[in-house]
Image: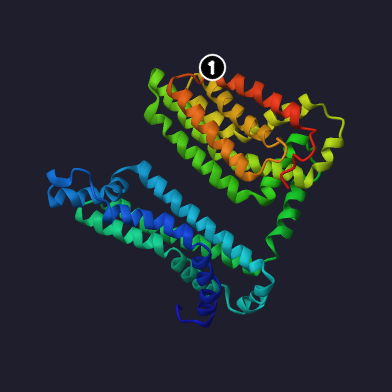
Amino acid sequence: MIRSPLTNILLKIFVNGFYRVHAGFLTLLFGTVICYCFFIIPLNQTHLSPQDRILENLIFTLTLLSSPLVMALVFLIWLFYTFKSWQYIARQLRAESHQFLFYSVTAFSKARQFQSWFVIQLVILLPAIGYALMTITVGLIFEYYWVPVIAVIYLIALALLSAWIYVRLTNELPKEVKGHTLLLRFTGSWKKPFFSLFFYHIADRLKIMYSVTKTLSLLMLVCLSYFFNDVTGLRSAAIIMLIVSMTHVMLVYQSQVFEDTFLSFARNFAYSRIRLYINFIILYSLLLLPEGIILLTYFPPFVAAGLFLFTLSILVLCRCLLYRPGITLRDYLWWITILFTGYFILVLFNQWSWLGFFNLLISYFVFHRNYYETGNSML
């Protein structure tokens, strides 16, 4: 199976290119972990025995073996890495230079295709597999057995799912054609309010970004169960909701790109600025709806509403900042960094409860002043 002609061709086309394109990402992601696990030197190590030094080097791996939360975080990183491979291979399959694969690959049976794609994904997952093997070794030494088994099953499941996706990609019509047809089939007769148009754009072109954003956001909300304890718990909850808002900033940026690309004519509509601003509030309220529901399971309605308003107001403010004339993505990220630092300091002093209304006031002022200004397109 490994030496089959199909596998060899796919290895040369996709695996080599994937590692070449993502060399920097892989070095940062897995190189940092390896350096931490094997080469970090504890401070004041003179009082540590050799056995204790080894334990310090393996603390991250041991935490993975003993903490479900850390295990979920590592699994999330592996899932994100797999998403990157899906995105890369799907993009390469659409390239004109690789169109011949739709004819040559489909000459093999689907079972043979599945086997070859399974091998391809295993090779792509080699960095994660290497870390999983290290986890298995440490787990056997320190008598942690279940997590290594779960890690192996998880990686095999990712490889199987990836192989299934690749087989579908190479045996069906391009995804864009089918996606548009399916989306129009169910929503063609629906009324589409102005604020809802970005959700259709997410369903069409930003599914992976939305999925990763929501996964990170919901993972942060899981931490609430560990920190909810009166005032300290509310301060910790506000910090977590601040991080949740930061996970959505690229979706906010994409909403502005969507408006500049497809809705530039909308500024000629007879919509008042207050109506457009309310559309933003509705849009991001719906975008944060899953987080709002989870907040209600942790806090009384009044407290949950305050935390939700705090998060919502940050997104609305970030959106309105994108209307500043001449702003670029680099400027936007710089503003995000400044806002995050300032909000974090205020939350540490438990001064977050009034920020929701303050952010909405400032954001409307920025929006009202800059909406019709020339040169405020992101394109």
Rendered image coloring scheme: rainbow
Residue at 52%, 35% (x, y): give it.
244
- Can you say whether 247 is above or below 112 in the image? above
Q: Is residue 70 left or right of residue 165?
A: left
The quadrant in which residue 367 appears is top right
Amino acid, disc 1? Phe
Q: How many labels does the image show?
A: 1
Nearest the eye: 147 or 58 = 58
The quadrant in which residue 125 appears is bottom left
Q: Does residue 102 appear in the picture of this structure?
A: no
Residue at 34%, 59% (x, y): give it.
131
**Crowding at label 1, few (<14), some or many (≥20) Cα neighbours within 10 Å?**
few
Give residue 318's position: percent from left, percent from top.
Answer: 63, 34
Nearest the eye: 201 or 355 = 355
Q: Is residue 161 left or right of residue 312?
A: left
Q: Mark 1 points at which residue?
A: 302
Secondary structure at badge 1 equals helix
Q: Is residue 352 left or right of residue 65?
A: right
- Can you say whether 43 is above or below 244 in the image? below
The quadrant in which residue 284 appears is top right
Give residue 145's position: percent from left, percent from top.
Answer: 26, 53
- Can you say whether 340 is above or below 91 in the image? above
Residue at 40%, 24% (x, y): give it.
228
Give residue 339's position: percent from left, percent from top.
Answer: 55, 31
Give residue 60's position: percent from left, percent from top.
Answer: 30, 48
